[in-house]
Amino acid sequence: MKAQPRPHLPMRPAWLCRNCAAPWPCGPAQLDLVAEFYGHSIALAFYLASSMQEAVDDMYGLGGCPDLAVMHSRFLGWLSLARRSRRDNRR
């Protein structure tokens, strides 16, 4: 019996990947999200923006002071690259 791969989901309130312990969304999670939301990039952007807000709230709740530019880059900064590569593949 072959073991199922563990999904790359966030562990709250730290917002680290439950599988690889990298800051979530880690690389594998980004790939999974692009596949899951394929054709629905606006819904993906809303989901990630909501997740970013929850992560910021969790960090403040833990007594931290998150760098909002870093959080934006981590949660939303990679989206344009995911969309661009899809558009480039159609040419």
Image: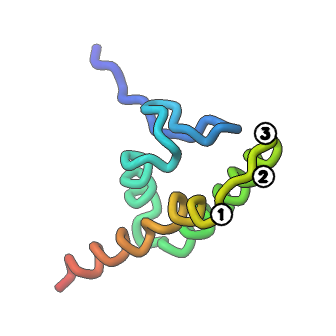
What crowding class fits label 1: few (fewer than 14 Cα within 10 Å), some (14-19), or many (20 or more)? few
**First in sequence: mark 2 or mark 1?**
2
Amino acid type, residue under disc 2 in the picture? Asp
Q: Nearer the viewer, residue 85 or 70?
A: 70
- Residue contact between numbered discs 2 and 1, judged by CB atoms under 8 Å: no
Q: Which mark is residue 62?
A: 3
Q: CA distance from mark 2 to mark 1?
A: 11 Å
Q: Is residue 33 left or right of residue 85?
A: right
Q: Nearer the viewer, mark 2 or mark 1?
A: 1
Q: Position of residue 54 (x, y in %)?
A: 72, 53
Q: Position of residue 56 (x, y in %)?
A: 72, 54
Q: Which mark is residue 57?
A: 2
Q: Which mark is residue 68?
A: 1
Amino acid type, residue under disc 3 in the picture? Leu
Q: Nearer the viewer, residue 14 or 31?
A: 14
Where 82 falls versus 59 (above or below)? below
Residue 6, image quadrant:
top left
Helix, strand or loop at label 2? It is helix
Q: Position of residue 34 (x, y in %)?
A: 40, 60
Residue shown at 32%/78% (left/top)?
A: 84
Helix, strand or loop at label 1? It is helix
Residue shown at 44%/47% (left/top)?
A: 26
What crowding class fits label 3: few (fewer than 14 Cα within 10 Å), some (14-19), or many (20 or more)? few
